[in-house]
Image (spheres, grey):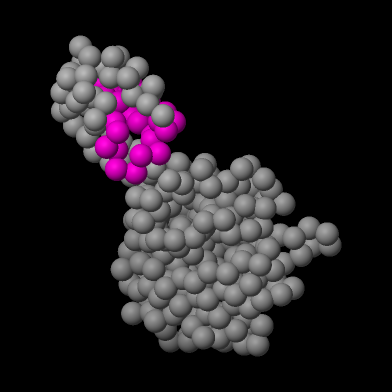
Amino acid sequence: MAVTTIKISNLTRRFDQLVAVDDVSLQVAAGTTLGLIGPNGAGKTSLLRMLATLSMPDAGDVLIGGRSVLRDPRQVRRMLGFMPAEFGYPRGLTIHEYLEYFGSLYQVPTADLPQRIRDVKELTDLAARPDVAVRGLSTGNRQRLLLARTLLHDPDVLLLDEPASGLDPRARNELRAIIRTLATLGKTIIVSSHILPDLEDVSDSIAIMEAGKLVVHGDLQQLRQSGVEAGISVRIRVDSAVLQQAADLLRAIPGVHECRIHDQGLLVRSEDDGGNSLLEALIRERIQVQEFSREALNLEQIFMRSTAGRVT
């Protein structure tokens, strides 16, 4: 099992006058998965490239397994696998030749390489596929092959930049299953994506970037429950005959920001943390409450409430 933590301290990256990553600090616990999200231009890829030692920060540092990307880049590279957003490949190679080529670049021992190739092909569902030329692969199979390449040297840390880009729903589901499997093996994973339900399904914690800054970071379950502002979201179910009456009543309560009819019930967002004022109003009007349950925020709601649409 991996024991590799990622500690990012005051990391900054500039391109002329543009600050792509602005004083970012966060930590990813060993064996957990961090979902990295943000608008286009938020600085996610710039951050991942610094973690992968492909570009150097202008300020700050990153410790991966206690090793600095500034002082020990070669040691850091041995611990991590980086899956870039764009494929790129040597022309004319078959799947097997491609993996052999990158296995040699990763300095996988020659005696171990055939078994490593079999293992990563099995994990990424490439084992039963024909050994065709890489250039002829579909988008889904290219992403599988890119992930297989990333895993060849059995890294403890995985940096996955938009791994679901261009994939159909079935392929995305398969990719999520692979990421969950890797997590059970103790890998420490950072995965960026614009497809928020996919990240919600695989992440232990979430980091949201905007305009180069880290605006939200925390345990996903805690963020779902607390949101990023005071108040609660609740689902209320009453008899259909009084549904509209209940909606009008709740909308008139101070502190209720939203009350809408949905799926034969009411979804209410209120500043009242306990929801007592909502229940009191309904009971006072003798409206029988059949269901009153707190709604956890989903990742899209957390993202929309945390960002203002700014880019660097």
Q: Would you place residue 89 above or below residue 251 in this image?
A: below
Quadrant of res 251: top left
Question: Farthest residue in the top direction?
Answer: 241
Residue range corresponding to the magenta coloring = 255-278
- Name the residue at 75% across, 60% down: 19
Question: Residue 292, image x and y in percent?
Answer: 22, 34
Task: Reply yes or no: does residue 106 show up in magenta.
Answer: no
Residue 209, image x, y percentages? 59, 55
Q: Is residue 126 above or below residue 29?
A: above
Establish if 229 lies above or below 235: below
Q: Is residue 15 visible?
A: yes
Question: What residue is at 40 percent from the left and 53 percent from the top?
Answer: 223
Quadrant housing residue 259: top left
Where does the image place residue 217, in percent across and percent down from the top left?
49, 60
Q: Is residue 265 magenta?
A: yes
24 or 294, nearer to the observer: 294
Q: Going 57% across and 56% down the picture, which residue do you hit?
A: 215
Residue at x-position 41% and y-position 64%? 33
